[in-house]
Image (spheres, rainbow, N blue to C red):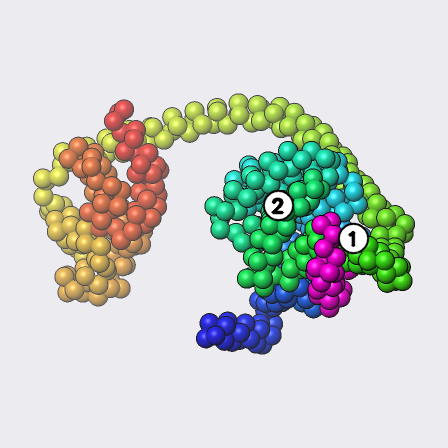
Amino acid sequence: MRKLLFFVLFLYSSLIFSVENNNDYGSAFFFNKQGDSLYAKGKFQLALKKYNLALNHIKKTDSVRIKIDILNNIGIIYDYSGDYSAALKFYLKALHECEENNLQTKKAVTYNNIGALYFLKNQYNEALDYFNKSLKIELKQNNKLGIAQSYENIGIINKNLNKYNNAENYYLKAYKIYKQLNNKYGLSSVYDNLGALYFIQQKYDKALETYLNSYKIQQDNNEIFGQIFSLNNIGEVYLAKNQYELAKEFFVKSLKLSKKDKIREQIKFSYINLSKVYAKQNDYKKALEYYKLFTQIRDSIFNETQSKLFAELKTKYEIEKKETKIKTQQITIKNKQKIIIISVSGIILSLVLLTILFWFYRQKTKAFKDLVKLNVEIANKTIENNTEKYTTSNLKTDIKDKLYNKILEYIETEKPYLNNDFSITNISEYLNTNNKYISQAINENHKTNFNNFINKYRVDYARKLLLDPKNKNLSLEGIASLAGFNTRATFISAFKKFTGVTPSFFLKNQANN
């Protein structure tokens, strides 16, 4: 009881949340679940209203899988209510969505539903074709439940084609899988179908036993539609055994439940069998009364207009499918023709461009290698002279030149640029002057700004590091950090600016020089 109360509160809160937040997906999910609950109780008309609400909401989303489920659910309601044309309409919509989105599992379910419609029209070969299509998908997907359902459907067709041994084999295959899955609904369905098979072979006691097994499962699980079906089946067995009062009792129970939710196919079945019961009891007035009711509902379920509409829907679907395929093929052909023309032109142009690019590449590679050679020579020369002290004996006594010489002496002896936090302020503090004088001395004597002046020293140092075999295991980030650069990107940019090549190109090609 507490679990039921919690579930109801959960559903209610979900609905409030969906409405308040305009959550179409949540609303669709909620209404679809409500429809399922009502369907399980045999309240088909109420279930249909919920499914339609779900469909209206899901159309505003991109949730294709749930949309297919809802379309199939609506089709099933129309199917059980005897409106087969409407059922086919929704099944075909579901099938279209499956094909558009390549949803094979959903496609298998829809094939089964369409096959069931053809079965009700007594078009067994068409029905078998759809059931086999479904089975093929289910086997490929290894969907145990789907395989069992397809086996069961194929068994029904074999039964109606009087291939009783084949039918029983398929039913037993399905039963084995349902048993493994502990699927009560599936077991109930197999019992019903086995009962029908035994009944048609006049094995009435075996038929009654399996029908009663099915009915018990349906009662335990409160499956109203299943109960309606089983009640009619049990009544039919009692009728065949000439136990008319028992037969009447079960037909009347089934009829009462069927009328409650307008399940016309089962109402029709109850009417014809009640007519037979009263005829056997010589109550011809009652027999005629039920027979008239039977003919009225039979004609309303599947009259000539309905049959025509059913066929037209299927034909229209097939035509639209073929037209779409033709259009797709035409577009594909045109696109392929364009691709061929563009490709041929592209190949010719590419060959010309490749020849030109190859020549430029050779020239560029040669130029880069020459640059590397020059850089190696410079670096080696710097290494050779690395121990020489800077002297200022031949410099002019001009203040600016003196300051510049002091800057050079400080930079080259102390190597402060190897600290990545080094700035112009550090020099001015060291030389006891100001930033402006330092900047002016560098700009006028070195013809560059402070950053380029310092980066040139860092690049020269990095170049020596790259030439030293001891550093072969260092990454570019490591070299950059040792040379005083803050980032790898800044290092690469500065290196290329002063050497003409990237550090990686220099490193790769310096070994050849």
Residue at image coords 69%, 39%? 201
Residue at image coords 73%, 35%? 161
Q: Nearer the viewer, residue 448 or 57?
A: 57
The quarter of the picture where residue 385 lies is: top left
Would you name the residue on which mark 2 appears? Answer: 206
Foreground mark, 1 or 2?
A: 2
> In what element is the residue under mark 2?
helix
Q: Nearer the viewer, residue 233 or 103?
A: 233
Locate residue 145, reporting x and y percent.
55, 46
Q: Residues within 10 Å of mark 1 (few under 14, many from 20)?
A: many
What amino acid is found at the position of numbered circle 2 in the picture? Lys
- Asked if residue 473 is positioned above or below residue 439 in the image, the reply reads above
Residue at image coords 90%, 50%? 304
Q: Which quadrant does the C terminus fall into?
A: top left
Res. 83 visible in picture: no
Would you name the residue on which mark 1 appears? Answer: 84
| Residue 100 on the magenta span | no
The quarter of the picture where residue 472 lies is: top left
Q: Nearer the viewer, residue 150 or 472?
A: 150
| Residue 251 on the magenta span | yes
Q: Residues within 10 Å of mark 2 (few under 14, many from 20)?
A: some
The magenta region covers 239-267
Left or right: 183 in relation to 119:
left
Q: Nearer the viewer, residue 292 or 155?
A: 292
Tally of numbered tags: 2
Locate residue 126, reporting x and y percent.
75, 38
Mostly what secondary structure, the magenta segment?
A: helix
Locate residue 309, reporting x and y percent.
86, 50
The quarter of the picture where residue 125 lies is: top right
What amino acid is found at the position of numbered circle 1 in the picture? Tyr
Residue at image coords 59%, 67%? 30
Q: CA distance from mark 1 to mark 2?
A: 32 Å
